Image: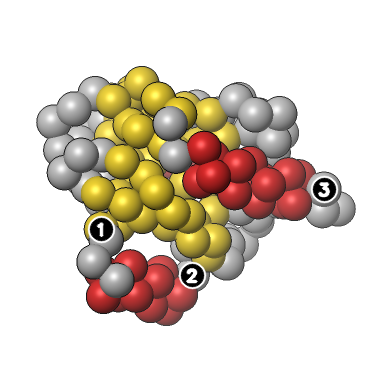
Amino acid sequence: MTSSRLALEADARRSILSHAREGAARDPPAEVCGVLAGDSDARTVTDVHPVSNVADDPRVAYELDPEETVSIIEAVETAGDDAVGFYHSHPESDPVPSATDREQASWPGYVYLICSPDGRMNAYEWTGNEFHELTIAVE
């Protein structure tokens, strides 16, 4: 991927924020996560697939359930779409990569979208060494 822009369909944005708000409403609040699907060449997200967060402490971390993630990516590709990247929420902090996010990022070239239940969201491409911020265009 080479564009510094992420096109995010409005329905996909609503789904991400709804999921983030569900996680924030838990007691204690929990990060939620999932797969972003669409066209990786055009860097367009048309669909969102929630995945269980299996992190030891979901209040401050996320870990995509490996089996669910593989199953969803296979289903997305079977349907003719691409896995564009992943999303997760920060229910109690700003939607920017944390130190843990940087340590655990492992998919170079993919989008990592971070959102806050209040509607803020930021997207980044993981280069393998660092996150490069992307401009989000809601379409």
Residue 85 or 79: which is nearer the viewer? 79
The circle drawn on residue 65 is: 2
Calculate the distance from the C-alpha at mark 3 to the C-alpha at mark 1.
31 Å
- Residue at 59% x, 49% y: name it: 15
Residue at numbered disc 1: 82
Q: Is residue 65 visible?
A: yes
Q: Is residue 28 visible?
A: no
The kind of residue on which mark 1 rests is Asp
The circle drawn on residue 25 is: 3
Residue 95 or 78: which is nearer the viewer? 78
Give SS at disc 2.
loop
Q: Earlier in the sequence, mark 3 or mark 1?
A: 3
> Which image quadrant is residue 42 in?
top left
The kind of residue on which mark 3 rests is Ala
**Cβ–Cβ below 8 Å for labels 3 and 1?**
no
Where 111 sits versus 30, above or below? above
**Classed neighbour count for the residue bearing mark 3: other residues with Cα under 10 Å, few (<14), some (14–19), many (≥20):** few
- Residue at 23% x, 66% y: name it: 80
Where 88 sits versus 58, above or below? above
- Residue at 54% x, 44% y: name it: 11
> Which image quadrant is residue 55 in?
bottom right
Front label number (3 vs 2): 3
**Classed neighbour count for the residue bearing mark 1: other residues with Cα under 10 Å, few (<14), some (14–19), many (≥20):** many
The kind of residue on which mark 2 rests is Asp
Give SS at disc 1.
strand
In the picture provided, is 122 more to the left or to the right than 102? right
Calculate the distance from the C-alpha at mark 2 to the C-alpha at mark 1.
19 Å
